[in-house]
């Protein structure tokens, strides 16, 4: 039997809310990794986190939003390091993207999660505005340094390059399911870097 | 009331089977376009095609395989034209890929279909061996002509370039859902073409 002691001046609700919130996110990431995206249900998440389904639905509109938060927003991406060259910076950025996309929970979630986002107009808009935002910020920093070094012309099509890098990694790692060899980031960075640098 | 007349020497079963087969594929493409991939069910396909669900399951393992055949294998892709340059050939190949991916049934099917293929090991292997095979054949012809003209070195990484082109188009058109502007094929072809050509 659990006896709950409430301290008179403790902020009510918050700590327990915050623990429940974190427990739901942890249960979600675990279930997606164990069962895959399609087989993960809000009911199973709630059961593992020890809360009611209504507690989950009070915070998230549905499975896609919940999985997105649990798998992709919990870790802070480190800014792309300044390697001194466009191709070096792109390689570092791609290595981080490949690592993020091939982590067990992310790899299990990605295709189904993106399909659910793409099928819902409200969520679809968030693929660019939220899902791709950290990678875009990193790419813009890389382009700014490259322009300062005179490696590229200003006004590169950031979104096109971003779709190309993210799309290539998604296709290779997330869809075809091939293990990303050590050469993937290097070769992709060399190809795209050569394709956009000033001659 | 329908009276069925069987001619004594007509091949039995085939014509009716073939009509049923085509009717199922047509119903599938229509429903995916109207309802989206997730909301299309084998039951609804069978009802619209006027057959039993068992007739569908006798031919296809499930929804993913059926939708793949209905949406992506019914039209024969024309070989990429010989434009006389690597960038020109890549542009033509990308224009065809963009047109294929943004046709109504394909656009509605792609994200959910690829997620279902990626989630099943048996189907996942067919993304490269079947789904990407026509585009790969086209790309190999483009590379062969480019090597003969001395624009590229032999031994280009065909799969990497293919994942990059297909991934970029999938991301831009299929996931983010942006209308492919007239510049998409040109700019992507210029970037990737510059990235792989011999200097």
Image (cartoon, coloured by chain):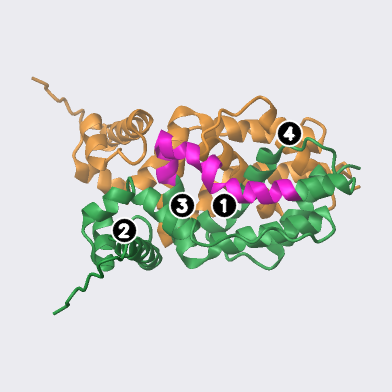
Chain colours: A green, B orange
**Which type of secondary structure does the marked residue at label 2 adopt?**
loop
Q: Which residue is mark 4?
A: B187
**Which type of secondary structure does the marked residue at label 1 adopt?**
helix
Residue at the far left in the pictured view: B1
Q: For the residues marked 1 and 3, what is the alpha-carbon distance in whole angstroms?
A: 9 Å
Query: Tag 4, which chain?
Result: B
- Residue lying at 81% horizontally and 61% vertically, measured from the top left: A83
Query: Tag 3, which chain?
Result: A
Classify A79 as above or below B171: below
Q: For the residues marked 4 and 2, what is the alpha-carbon distance in whole angstroms?
A: 39 Å
Category of crowding for the residue at label 2, using alpha-carbon neighbours closer than 10 angstroms: few (below 14), some (14–19), many (at least 20): few
Category of crowding for the residue at label 1, using alpha-carbon neighbours closer than 10 angstroms: few (below 14), some (14–19), many (at least 20): many
Q: Is residue A158 left or right of residue B16?
A: right
**Which type of secondary structure does the marked residue at label 3 adopt?**
helix
Q: In the rendered structure, which segment of residues is drawn in magenta?
A: A115-141
Query: Tag 2, which chain?
Result: A
**Which type of secondary structure does the marked residue at label 4 adopt?**
helix
Residue at the far top in the pictured view: B1
Category of crowding for the residue at label 3, using alpha-carbon neighbours closer than 10 angstroms: few (below 14), some (14–19), many (at least 20): many
Q: Which residue is mark 1?
A: A171
Residue at the far bottom in the pictured view: A1
Foreground pick, B193 / A148: A148
Residue at the far front in the pictured view: A9
Q: Is there a contact, CB below 8 Å, between mark 4 and mark 1?
A: no
Q: Which residue is mark 2?
A: A39
Where residue B178 appears, as percent x and y from the top left, is 55, 31
Q: Is there a contact, CB below 8 Å, between mark 3 and mark 4?
A: no
- Residue lying at 60% horizontally and 29% vertically, measured from the top left: B180
Q: Is residue A4 within the magenta segment?
A: no
């Amino acid at each position: 039997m659990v006896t709950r002691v409430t301290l008179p001046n403790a902020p009510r609700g918050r700590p327990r809310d915050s623990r429940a919130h974190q427990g739901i996110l942890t249960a979600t990431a675990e279930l997606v990794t164990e069962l895959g995206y399609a087989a993960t249900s809000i009911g199973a998440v709630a059961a593992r986190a020890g809360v009611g389904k209504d507690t989950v639905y009070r915070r998230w509109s549905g499975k896609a939003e919940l999985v997105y938060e649990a798998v992709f927003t919990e870790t802070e991406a480190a800014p792309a390091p300044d390697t001194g060259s466009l191709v070096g910076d792109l390689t570092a950025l791609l290595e981080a993207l490949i690592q993020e996309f091939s982590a067990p929970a992310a790899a299990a979630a990605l295709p189904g999660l993106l399909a659910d986002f793409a099928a819902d107009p409200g969520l679809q808009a968030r693929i660019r505005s939220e899902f791709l935002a950290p990678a875009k910020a990193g790419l813009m920093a890389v382009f700014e340094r490259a322009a300062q070094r005179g490696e590229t012309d200003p006004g590169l099509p950031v979104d096109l390059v971003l779709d190309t890098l993210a799309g290539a990694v998604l296709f290779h790692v997330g869809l075809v399911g091939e293990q990303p060899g050590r050469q993937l980031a290097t070769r992709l960075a060399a190809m795209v870097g050569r394709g956009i640098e000033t001659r």
